[in-house]
């Protein structure tokens, strides 16, 4: 796709928060939704409609999130997007048990890296990790960057109600700083301990709950001294202000 031109200067439009999902993960989401076994009201609220709905819109959303090829590229062309940065959609693997999460994160990274290799001028991607197993997450980030040529990591905010200000997660920060790649914190629906009044009012998702949850996560990370311990760490927070849309900020300074 030819670059756009404004004022005589060429530029590329890069969409930085483009959701995708693997067939394996979608099937697991759907199974858990049908069984009611997730034990996560935020996940149920966020995914039940689009995960199980049979309307034309719901089916189209699922199909588009699964596609990492010509259909997605066609949609990009129609919208004037030159490149997408692909992120495994929220909540990713973070509400699963550690063993399953580690395996599905690695499998999804293998899959998305294949799409990047096939369409290097249209796609880049961040690696999914399983923060519930911090050492394994750090190793998967290293594999994703050094072997799969991914550009960093995506973490879908809290992991089963736990936040990255807890030092047990800091091996992930250490790996990212050593690799000189960013960690992108994508919002998630608030955890069980926070979601009650938001869920009751239909405000738990992107309309407001994402901003509340991710904004708090940013402040906990700053207050915990993460950037004192890892001064070269790069972190990007998406959608964390209620009025920000897809705006992201670099919190490393």
Image (cartoon, rainbow, N blue to C red):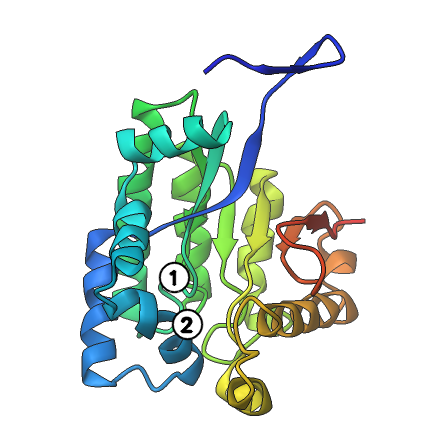
Q: Is residue 180 above or below residue 45?
A: above
Find the distance from the CA under tag 2 to the CA under tag 1. 12 Å
Q: Which residue is mark 1?
A: 92
Q: Nearer the viewer, residue 85 or 73?
A: 73
Q: Residue furthest front?
A: 56
Q: Is residue 184 above or below residue 188?
A: above
**Is residue 107 left or right of 209 when viewed as pictured?**
left
Residue 190 location (% of width, % of height)? 54, 78
Residue 13 location (% of width, % of height)? 58, 28
* Camera sees residue 59: yes
Residue 94 location (% of width, % of height)? 40, 68
Instruction: Find numbered disc 2 in the image and state the secondary structure of the residue it sits on.
Output: helix
Q: Which residue is mark 2?
A: 46
Classify residue 75 by image quadrant.
top left
Classify residue 179 by image quadrant.
top right
Mark 2 crowdedness (10 Å alpha carbons): few <14, some 14-19, many ≥20: some
Residue at image x 61%, y 38%? 180
* Camera sees residue 114: no
Residue at image x 79%, y 58%? 228
Residue 35 location (% of width, % of height)? 19, 83
Mark 1 crowdedness (10 Å alpha carbons): few <14, some 14-19, many ≥20: many
């Amino acid at each position: 796709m030819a670059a756009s031109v404004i004022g005589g200067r060429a530029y590329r439009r890069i969409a930085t928060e483009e959701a995708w999902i693997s067939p394996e993960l979608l099937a697991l989401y759907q199974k858990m939704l049908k069984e009611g076994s997730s034990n996560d009201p935020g996940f149920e609220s966020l995914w039940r409609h689009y995960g199980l709905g049979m309307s034309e819109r719901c089916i189209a959303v699922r199909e588009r999130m699964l596609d990492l090829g010509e259909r997605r590229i066609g949609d990009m062309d129609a919208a004037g997007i030159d490149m997408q940065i692909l992120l495994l959609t929220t909540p990713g693997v973070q509400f699963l048990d550690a063993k399953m999460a580690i395996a599905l994160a690695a499998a999804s990274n293998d899959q998305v890296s294949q799409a990047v290799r096939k369409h290097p001028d249209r796609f880049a991607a961040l690696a999914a990790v399983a923060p519930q197993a911090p050492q394994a997450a750090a190793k998967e980030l290293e594999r994703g960057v050094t072997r799969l040529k991914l550009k960093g990591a995506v973490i879908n905010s809290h992991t089963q109600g736990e936040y990255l200000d807890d030092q047990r997660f800091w091996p992930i920060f250490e790996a990212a700083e050593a690799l000189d790649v960013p960690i992108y914190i994508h919002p998630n629906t608030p955890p069980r301990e926070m979601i009650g009044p938001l869920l009751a009012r239909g405000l738990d998702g992107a309309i407001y709950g994402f901003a509340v949850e991710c904004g708090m996560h940013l402040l906990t990370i700053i207050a915990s001294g993460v950037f004192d311990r890892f001064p070269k760490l790069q972190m990007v927070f998406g959608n964390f202000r209620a009025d920000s849309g897809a705006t992201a900020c670099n919190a490393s300074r």
